Each structure stands twice: as C-alpha cells, then as structure tokens.
Amino acid sequence: MPPRQRLSPADRRAQLLTVGAQLFAARPYAEVLMEDVAEQAGVSRALLYRHFPSKHDLFAAVYQQAADQLLAKTRFDPAQTLVEQLVEGMDAHLDYFIANRNAVLAANRVLAGDPVIQTIMTNELDALRSRLLNVLPLADEAARTAVSGVLKSWLVFVQVLCVDWLTRETCSRAELRDVCIGAVLGAIRPLLAVDPAPQWPR
C-alpha cells in the first residue's frame, strides 16, 4: 500500500470516487472488491468504510457523479439547431457508456431494479426531458404535455438500445446515434407546429 496522504474529508471522498470509478469501469461489478479500492487509494479499509459503508454505496456515489457530469455536458443551447444539440448530447452519453461499459452494465443489468440506482437514472432522464422541452417550439400546454410523454418513452428507448448495443454491437456507433436521433425527430414532428429539424431527412 502506498503511503497515505493527508487529505480533507471532501478531498478524500473525491479521491475514493475517482478510484472507484476507475475500478468499476475496468471490471465487472462482482469483481470489484472494497479491499482493492482501499489498496489502490492508499487508505485503510476502515477509512474507506467510513466514507462508503458498502460497495453498493460506493457504486451509487460513482454513478451519481457520472450522471451529474453527463448532465453538465448536455446543456442545450438555443443558439444551436436541435440536431446539433441532440448530437452533442448523444455523443457525451455514448463516450461515457463506451469508456465505462462495465459500470453501465452493472447499473442496468446487475443492479436493475435497485431503488437507489433507479432513482439516479430517473432523475437524469427527467432532467434531460425538461431541457429538451425548453428548446422545442411548443405551441401550447397541450403540445408540451404530449411531447413530454413522447420524450419520456424515447429516453427509455435510448437507454435500453444503448445498453443492448454495449452487450452486442449490431451497428456502428454513428448508426446507433443516428437511429436514436431519427427516432425522436420522427416521434415529435406530428406534435409540433414547426418542424424542429427541417434539414434532417424524414
């Protein structure tokens, strides 16, 4: 074990999250041991458990941090076209999914149904839906309600499709992204008075 560094509680937590994120990305969930996290971080197991009482707690914190970072990278800019914003958002998520395949599969397969992990996912999807609603040309509240329902279903579709793609790449990354973007454009066009992406083929 490397010599322990003196860090503030906040810095120590950040360090442990970084180490945890690296291990959960590199290994399947079952193969990540808290002992390995402590050793790689250069701390005692007792200190690690003071910050994170269990592997589940550590994983949940790692996944929450990832969700927060992805939302920070997916800030829709009204100055851009809708397609440009969708491309940037999809690219940010696909970059994370590919780099952290084991963590994504753990959250969506190993821990599927776990209330803590599901809450993190639901909150992120709700935030993305709200941001999309704010940049779409919605005529009235009825249109907003209808489009909101479509976006909720679309975000779940994207999540399931991307997780399946990580398991078996049946198409290229670019094709996966375009399928997701084409799906949402096709779904919301009938509900909008103005075509939000006239440059995207119907």
Image (cartoon, grey):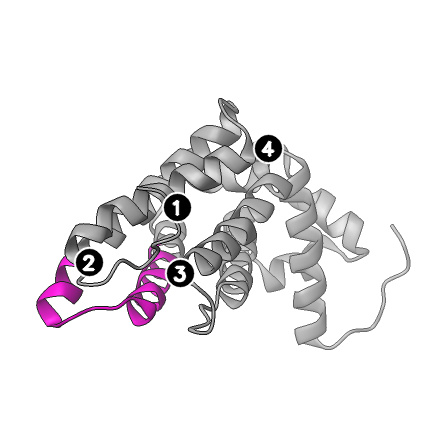
Disc on the earlier residue, 1 or 4: 4
Q: Residue 190 at what x, y percent from top left? A: 16, 51
Report helix, strand or loop for mark 3: helix
Report helix, strand or loop for mark 2: helix
Q: Which tag is nearer the camera, tag 4 or tag 2?
A: 2
Residue at left offset 36%, top offset 68%: 131
Q: Check if residue 8 falls in the magenta segment.
A: no
Q: Nearer the viewer, residue 191 or 125?
A: 191
Give the residue number, with chain letter if any, for mark 3: 82
Q: Residue 20 at what x, y percent from top left? A: 66, 51
Give the residue number, with chain letter if any, for mark 4: 28
Q: Residue 32 at what x, y percent from top left? A: 64, 38
Crowd tier of the residue under label 3, counting other residues whose Cα lies within 10 Å: few below 14, some 14–19, many 20 or above: many
Q: Amino acid at mark 4?
A: Pro
Q: Nearer the viewer, residue 127 or 107?
A: 127
Disc on the earlier residue, 1 or 2: 2
* Stretch of the chain drawn in magenta: 122-146
From the viewer's perspective, tell me whether residue 121 is left or right of residue 75: left
Disc on the earlier residue, 3 or 1: 3
Real-space Cα separation, disc 3 to disc 4, in angstroms: 36 Å
Q: Amino acid at mark 3?
A: Leu
Q: Residue 44 at what x, y percent from top left? A: 75, 56
Q: Residue furthest right?
A: 3
Disc on the earlier residue, 3 or 4: 4
Q: In the image, is residue 71 above or below residue 37?
A: below
Disc on the earlier residue, 4 or 2: 4
- CB-based contact (under 8 Å), mark 4 and mark 2: no
Q: Amino acid at mark 1?
A: Ile
Give the residue number, with chain letter if any, for mark 2: 147
Give the residue number, with chain letter if any, for mark 1: 181
